Image (cartoon, grey):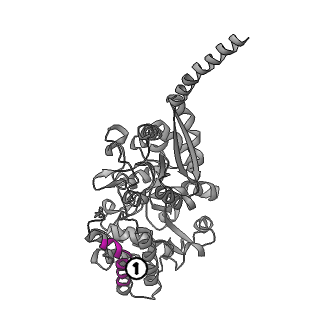
Amino acid sequence: MARWKALALLGLLALGPLSCGRNSEQVTLSFWAMGREGELVSQLVPDFEREHPGIRVEVQQIPWSAAHEKLLTAQVGHATPDLAQLGNTWIAEFHALGALAPVPASGGIFSPAAHFPGIWATNVIAGQAYGMPWYVDTRLLFYRRDLLAKAGYATMPGDWEGWRQALAAIKAGGEARYGILLPLNEWVVPAVLGLQAGSPLLTDRLSRGVFSGAAFRRGLDFYLQLFREELAPLAGSQEIANIYQEFARGTFAMIITGPWNLGEFRQRLPAELQDAWATAPLPGPTGPASGLSLAGGSSLVVFKDSPRASEAWQFVAYLLSPAVQQRFYRLSGDLPACREVWQAQEFAADSNLVAFERQLERVIETPKIPEWEQIASRLQLRAEAAVRGVLSADEAMAALDADVDRILEKRRWLLARGLASGGDEASP
């Protein structure tokens, strides 16, 4: 018995290193994903793990409300995951912190040609991509096609003046109380109109505002005109109890919003109006080609400290493959970043999705600096003051430029000492 016990013990000792060897061959990736996408992406992981038996993926779902602070804390504490979902407006901030690994230049899905140019640009800092577009969004017009037709328009005009005249015709004909809802507690529309008019929003290596400049003022003047002519109500989104109900009632005939409302309009509007609404790209000052909108969405990033970067990029490539992008769209309703997917029948046959594809070909990023969200908040406040007549347009934009100069004072100090990147200025 003693002899057999000794042999058994030797056998266990021999098996021990082999067992450890097998475990060490498997790599476990930590992936932080936000909001509902964090819940849904878990459904895509099993297929990846079957195709890559040496890689496991642990998904941690994080609420959007906590995501930014959690990521910053992880970066400071050297506890970042291998990869994460990142709002594409956060790319510049985490690049400035030295948190992100550069995207490998391996072609295919990792090449700019596979993506919408304006969306790809949101991930690029000083010529190098640091994130990969996962899903995309932008803003365009949702409108009552039936009310536009009754006002004498078969299609949506493509330039500002034609658009304004259509809004006026809808209101004058009594088809709607207002032509369009432009919530005063949002900054997107004045920013978009300024970009369409040719303003970079910021200048001097993204360290000073140019909101008082002629280009931005042209966009702001058009925005203010819509309120002066009572084509838009003096109201914030919180003052409209239910935008779907008011849209159905004809309180307003148009709204500028994003793809998240495609499903909402299909579910919340009455059955008799399902064929009465449509989407269209934003008009521009001189026509459709100048009808820019904002480049939005989320990206996938790999953190510089990850010792498993190679495996992380394999998982990114899987999530961006056309078949998986199409599956994720069906799960989430998020618009795919991969341009190839848009050729599928379910996209090409849906006119509302086609309008988004056309708009996504004409999108531009907001200035890629960490302070942009503060600036956007001040833009909303100053634009609202101009709409309500609290300040003149000149006073409002001069005040906004002063706000921006204060916000960016530290940036100018860092730039002067070579401690910050000059960034990429928007170029409509």
Q: Image height check: is 2 above or below 283?
A: above
Image coordinates for residue 177, horizontal then vertical, percent: 55, 75
Q: Secondary structure at mark 1?
A: helix
Q: Quadrant of the N terminus?
A: top right
Query: For the stretch drawn in magenta, what is the main secondary structure?
Result: helix
Image coordinates for residue 360, horizontal then vertical, percent: 39, 54
The answer to whether residue 3 is left or right of residue 303 is right
**Residue 244 image-quadrant placement:** bottom right
Magenta region, residue range = 397-413
The residue to which callout 1 is attached is: 225
Q: Using the rendered image of the protein, determine whether residue 357 is visible from the camera's viewpoint.
A: yes
Image coordinates for residue 271, horizontal then vertical, percent: 64, 55
Taking depth in this image into account, of 50 and 262 the one nearest to the observer is 50
| Residue shown at the point (56%, 44%) measured from the top left | 59
| Classed neighbour count for the residue bearing mark 1: other residues with Cα under 10 Å, few (<14), some (14–19), many (≥20) | some
Residue farthest to the front, as pictured = 2
Q: Image height check: is 122 above or below 381?
A: above
| Residue shown at the point (41%, 73%) measured from the top left | 375
Image coordinates for residue 162, horizontal then vertical, percent: 37, 69
